[in-house]
Image (cartoon, grey):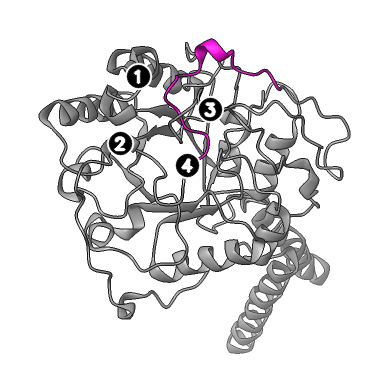
């Protein structure tokens, strides 16, 4: 009988960490509050370098083009991007598909930013399995009644399809009172370099604000800007050295430096560093993604054979008023440069959060063994006490 008495503890000792490890996610979103943006074309029906990098980085949010996004294969604009959300959402990555408001339909043409086609794209994005929609080029201030009607229609359609909506105003001073009613999250800065929050951002709710920098030249600066965003309490951040939002050349060292858990070495040469120059006479608006015509080198330790699709958008399908070389002071919404924006005083540094990066909460297997041994020890001591009381 003594054998069976101790056998139960032995079985418990073996099974406890196994069961806990089974129900505990092995690898999930990095909890680094990262909003990765990748406008480089990649077709996730085939292994490709971008997909490998995204899956290894594990951002909280990925902004990309699903099949029905503006530059997706079903987006109606000649694109060939095909980001498949099911490749990422099981890892805890929220996928948002790109469309543009174009200053509420005033910047480009009806096939790019028209309300009707955008509503159709939203319905398609829902069928793609995305978490939500990323709406670019939203007017930050002094919105007209027509502007508000446009944005309300976009948000209502997202809600009807159970999709979240991120809008991009690209300005740290904006009409938070209205815009907070037509979105779930807001991108407020595309040249963030560690500044304090503005009053608009604070009133909006910092946890809903995304700050990025698409001209961050070094990994050192990327780390610094990310840590500042953490400390001030911004919801998410991202840094890249590609003004067309391809993945940064320093991706691997950047993620490792901020506490990311990249189990394989993502070779920095897999990311296209220089953007292929595009004549300024062809393009004049910054944020509509332009496809890369260069191939990428795969992450050597994870994929041995990579197929990278590099189909370029025909020149005839690219709007004639999109700039490929935005300046740091004029990242988006060039059509609103004549509008006087609000000037928000910076928030005192006393509002800075005391928290730095989020720590991971998944415990290694050996720690569960220790917990199991502790529980068994308590049970044994309890049994001994009960036995003595009975005797």
Q: Tell me whether circle 3 and circle 1 mark residues in contact (CB < 8 Å).
A: no
Q: Tell me whether circle 4 and circle 3 mark residues in contact (CB < 8 Å).
A: no
Mark carried by residue 65: 3
Label whose residue precedes the other's in the sequence (1 or 2): 1
Which image quadrant is residue 389 in? Answer: bottom right
Q: Residue at x 66, y 84 (%)?
A: 384
Q: Residue at x 80, y 51 (%)?
A: 264
Q: Is residue 324 magenta?
A: yes
Q: CA distance from mark 3 to mark 1?
A: 14 Å
Left or right of 129 on screen, residue 6: right
Give the mark toward the camera: 4 or 2: 4
- Residue 361 seen in the current view: no
- Helix, strand or loop under label 2: loop
Task: Point out residue 43 in the picture as x, y percentages from the top left corner.
Answer: 67, 23
Q: Which residue is mark 1?
A: 118
Label whose residue precedes the other's in the sequence (3 or 1): 3
Give the mark toward the camera: 1 or 4: 4
33, above or below 375, in the image: above
Left or right of 125 on screen, residue 387: right
Q: Which residue is mark 4?
A: 326
Please identify the quadrant where the N terminus is shown: bottom right
Q: CA distance from mark 4 to mark 2?
A: 16 Å
Q: Which residue is mark 2?
A: 138
**In the rendered structure, which segment of residues is drawn in magenta?**
310-326
- Helix, strand or loop under label 1: helix
Taking depth in this image into account, of 389 and 20 the one nearest to the observer is 20
Q: CA distance from mark 4 to mark 3?
A: 21 Å
């Amino acid at each position: 009988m003594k054998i069976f008495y101790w056998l139960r503890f032995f079985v418990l000792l073996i099974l406890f960490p196994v069961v806990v490890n089974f129900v505990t996610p092995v690898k999930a979103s990095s909890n680094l509050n990262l909003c990765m943006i990748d406008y480089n074309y990649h077709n996730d029906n085939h292994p490709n370098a971008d997909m490998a990098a995204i899956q290894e980085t594990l951002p909280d949010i990925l902004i990309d083009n699903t099949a029905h996004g503006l530059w997706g294969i079903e987006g109606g604009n000649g694109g060939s991007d095909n980001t498949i959300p099911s490749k990422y959402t099981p890892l805890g990555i929220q996928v948002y598909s790109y469309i543009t408001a174009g200053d509420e339909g005033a910047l480009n043409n009806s096939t790019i930013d028209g309300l009707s086609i955008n509503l159709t794209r939203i319905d398609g994005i829902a069928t793609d399995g995305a978490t939500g929609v990323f709406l670019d080029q939203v007017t930050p201030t002094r919105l007209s009644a027509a502007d508000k009607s446009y944005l309300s229609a976009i948000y209502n359609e997202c809600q009807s399809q159970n999709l979240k909506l991120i809008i991009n105003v690209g300005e740290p001073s904006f009409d938070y009172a209205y815009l907070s009613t037509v979105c779930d999250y807001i991108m407020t800065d595309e040249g963030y370099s560690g500044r304090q929050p503005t009053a608009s951002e604070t009133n909006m709710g910092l946890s809903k604000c995304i700050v990025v920098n698409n001209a961050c030249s070094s990994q050192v600066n990327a780390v610094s800007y990310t840590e500042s965003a953490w400390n001030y309490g911004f919801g998410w951040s991202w840094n890249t050295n590609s003004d067309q939002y391809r993945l940064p050349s320093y991706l691997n060292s950047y993620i490792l430096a901020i506490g990311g858990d990249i189990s394989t070495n993502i070779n920095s040469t897999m990311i296209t560093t220089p953007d292929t120059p595009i004549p300024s006479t062809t393009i004049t608006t910054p944020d509509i993604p332009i496809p890369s015509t260069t191939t990428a080198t795969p992450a050597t330790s994870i994929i041995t054979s990579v197929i990278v699709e590099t189909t370029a958008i025909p020149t005839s399908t690219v709007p004639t008023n999109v700039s490929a070389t935005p300046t740091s002071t004029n990242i988006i919404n060039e059509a609103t440069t004549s509008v006087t924006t609000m000037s928000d005083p910076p928030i005192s540094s006393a509002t800075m959060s005391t928290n730095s990066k989020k720590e991971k909460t998944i415990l290694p297997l050996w720690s569960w063994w220790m917990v199991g041994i502790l529980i068994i020890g308590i049970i044994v001591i309890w049994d001994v006490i009960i036995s003595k009381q009975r005797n």
